[in-house]
Image (tube, helix red, strand yellow):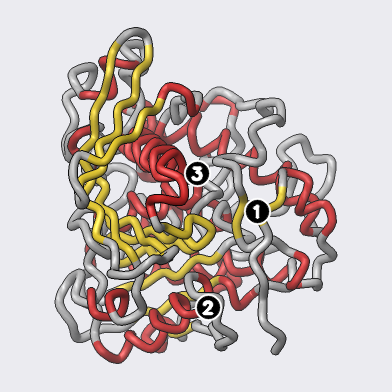
Amino acid sequence: MKALHLFLLPALALGLAACTATEDTPLVFSQENTASGYATPFLPAFADLPVQESLPDPFAYADGSGRALKARDWERRRAEILAQLEYYEVGQKPRTPKDCVKARMEDDTTLVVDVTVNGQTLTMHSVLKRPDGPGPFPVIIGCGFGGPGSLPRPIFEERSIAMVSFPFWEVMSHTQTRGNEPINRLYPELTEIGAYSAWPWGVSRLIDALEQLGPESRLDLEHLAISGCSFAGKMALWSGAMDERIALTIAQEPGGGGAAAWRVSETLGEVETVARTNYAWFKESMRDFSEENVARFPMDHHELCALVAPRALLVFGNPDYPWLADRAGYVSCVAARRVWEQYGIADRMGYSFQDKHMHCALPEEEWPELEAFVDRFMLGKDVPTEVTTAPMFEDTDLTQWIKW
């Protein structure tokens, strides 16, 4: 296997890539959202949405005009999926110009980020830990617990990878009071948005700030990763899906509202379903899709995962915790991976479901899988990253859900 190189190309970069030419398909982008120039697709009211019991086709254009079967077509399709997720689930992620963001180092370990909109300022304080030496160092954003999230810290320290925390509570609390969160000072009209719109907005502003620091930061932002576990695993997944400057997204045990497909979760009993999730994280109107109405979603979370394509995604599951609905996570991962497979870059998307360990405690058996993704997509090493492990779910009837 030839070494893969990192390309920072504009929005048209995907248009140059053949569906099997992996070395021509970018691993990361220099823009937050390369698909921002597309018009919003038609978004029907809830009552006008058709019922579809199986998972929607991630390749099918919203207007029925065809399917995005070549890598150059994915940008348009990605724009449609993102619009649907924002409209029906989390609300629109605020669009904030980079010149609204000011970055400064308060000391050698604290990055202060000021975001000023409508005369109001939101301030984040991120802990930045850099290795000794001139760098530049790849960097991982840790959601929820700082550092590399809940992932084993030695894996990153031994590889001289910088770590930066995302102080999510300085954007929106774990369980928001609508209209009274820090982000609402900047956007008082956006009281309907859920945390999984607000938190990815905060992550993007943190990335803006890291870019603003420039070379003196000693950070290699062309090799940027994000990680988190449980509710922070969802946070990492939504952030990676919504910001294409993130080269590697690691979603650890994200459960319902994360990687798990809502439709499949609805069949699994006492798990996190649309009716049972935390509505501080989503739009209140998403309740319309509870129970049998889940089949009215025009999209599902295999498409949330697919938004990371063509960049790298690694999902970890833990079937010992039924609430996580990991069978639904497995179905979703298999379905999402079809996008990477179609474009000839399947080894950029992996999943591993391992039992017999505590929640958010990655067992040593899975360390090599994590290390492979870190080595390849953060350090640029030529290592294999074929990770598709879920032996406990081999009896799943995938044809019930994947009909495209």
Q: Nearer the viewer, mark 1 or mark 3?
A: 3
Q: Amino acid at mark 1?
A: Pro
N-terminal-most mark, 1 or 2: 1
In the image: residue 125, left or right of residue 257? left
The residue that label 3 is drawn on is 242
Amino acid on which the number 3 mark rests in the picture: Met
Q: Is residue 71 left or right of residue 261?
A: right
Residue 41: x, y in percent?
A: 68, 29
Assess whether mark 3 and mark 1 are in contact (beta carbons under 8 angstroms). no
Q: Secondary structure at mark 2?
A: helix
Residue underneath mark 2: 376
Badge nearest the viewer, 1 or 2: 2
- Dividing the picture into quadrants, the one containing residue 306 is bottom right
> Which residue is painted at 77% across and 58% down in the image?
71
Would you name the residue on which mark 1 appears? Answer: 58
**Which element carries disc 1, helix, strand or loop?**
loop
Query: Residue visible at 48% across and 63% down?
Result: 248
Mark 1 to mark 3 CA distance (whole Å)? 16 Å
Nearest the camera: 124 or 235?
124
Which amino acid is tagged 2? Arg
Residue 192 vs residue 40: left or right? left
Q: Classify 10 Å Cα crowding around label 3: few (below 14), some (14-19), many (20 and above).
A: many
On the rendered image, what quadrant is the N terminus found in?
Answer: bottom right
Q: Earlier in the sequence, mark 1 or mark 3?
A: 1
Report which quarter residue 206 is drawn in.
Answer: top left
- As drawn, 154 above or below 122: below
